[in-house]
Amino acid sequence: MTEYTNIEIGDQLTPRSFETTIVQLFMYNAAVWNPHRIHFDLDYAKNEEGYAGIVNDGPLQGDWMTQIVVDWMGESARLKSFKYSNRQASYLGDRLQAVGTVVGKDDETRQVTLSLAIRNANGDDIAPAEAIVEFS
Amino acid sequence: MTMTELLTDDIRSHIGRSGPPARVTVTRVDIQKYSAATGQTRQAFLDGDEAPPLFHFNLGLPVLPLDQLRPDGLADDPLIPELPLKRIMAGTCETTFHRPIRAGDELVVTRWLDDIYEKQGGSGPLIFVVLGLKIETAGGEPVLDELISRIAR
């Protein structure tokens, strides 16, 4: 768990690797009731929508970034806001990593700003994000 | 192509319209399924006591019969007018959280069309559709506010 007083700008969150399987994409899209065929129908994704493979859900990548925030902040802090952008698609089985860095700290509000991203195997940040965490 | 050709007055007239509020009861198993599917590590999420931050994706959307789905699998969103560009991609999502969603919560989900605008992209015109989402408890306690954009090309 992170103690507010020990947080410094530049601190790195523990990164986490993610690699979807077709079972995970099935379960995620069932859980959020998303029947878009680009997430489970390879022929459709390639031939009708021009993707290179079965597409990972953008909001699933967003969720992964919130997970490294939740793991970092512990139970006594709360996620106040989260913003992410889908810049580039990623595909079933791609080796991805959720990464994050402390970029701001305000002692008056006890709010910490984090810069986050989903990074692909080429080192491209395909989904940049920002989170604000409030410590009690 | 000029910037005014794609979006007609009729399309713009939809900006600001809201859908009817949806009432949703969140069950423990809904949270457990989401938590398992996303690979959560916090025990309260896996047990379904409390929902992970982005659990609410698609919450409150109508569940439609199979014959009302489009060939791509999706349902038409009644808030979004027919657009001259058809391929939809996910854009940006910005959420402000007021309190976590918990098992047993009775929620009221309100959605509205916040904005539609166009931009010239590198490989052609893009239409940005911005949807607003507000979730409150049935008792009126704020849960979260969100703006989510989709890009048509």
Image (tube, coloured by chain):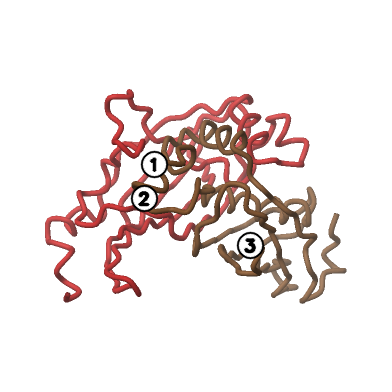
Chain colours: A brown, B red
* Between discs 1 and 2, the one toward the N terminus: 1
> Going 71% across and 41% down the picture, which residue do you hit?
B40
In the image, is residue A108 above or below residue B129? below
Given residues B89 and A5, the one toward you in this image is: B89
Instruction: Give whichever of A132, A51 is nearer the camera.
Output: A51
Identify the disc placed on residue A24: none
Q: Residue at 61% x, 35% y: name it.
A: B34
Q: Which x, y percent locates residue A6?
A: 87, 69
Disc 3 residue type (three-letter): Asn
In the rendered structure, which amino acid carries the disc numbered 1?
Tyr
Q: Are marks 2 and 3 in contact (CB under 8 Å)?
A: no
Q: Residues within 10 Å of mark 1 (few under 14, many from 20)?
A: some
- Compared across the picture, whether A88 is left or right of B37 comes to left
Residue indicated by mark 1: A44
Mark 3 residue element: loop
Quadrant of image for the N terminus of chain A:
bottom right
Q: Residues within 10 Å of mark 2 (few under 14, many from 20)?
A: some
Count every numbered label the image shows and give the total. 3
Apparent side of residue B117 relative to residue A81 in the rendered image (left or right): left
Q: Quadrant of residue A90?
A: bottom right
Residue B132: x, y in percent? 39, 52
Disc 1 + disc 2, Cβ < 8 Å: yes
Q: Nearer the viewer, residue B51 or B105?
A: B51
Q: Chain of mark 1?
A: A
The chain containing the residue under callout 3 comes to: A
Quadrant where the C terminus of chain A sits is bottom right
Would you say the residues marked 3 and 1 are in contact, meaning their CB atoms lie under 8 Å apart?
no
Residue that badge 2 annotates:
A49
Disc 2 secondary structure class:
loop
Q: Is residue A79 toward the left or the right of residue B143 in the image?
A: right
- Asked if labels 1 and 2 share a chain, the reply is yes
Q: Which residue is mark 3?
A: A120
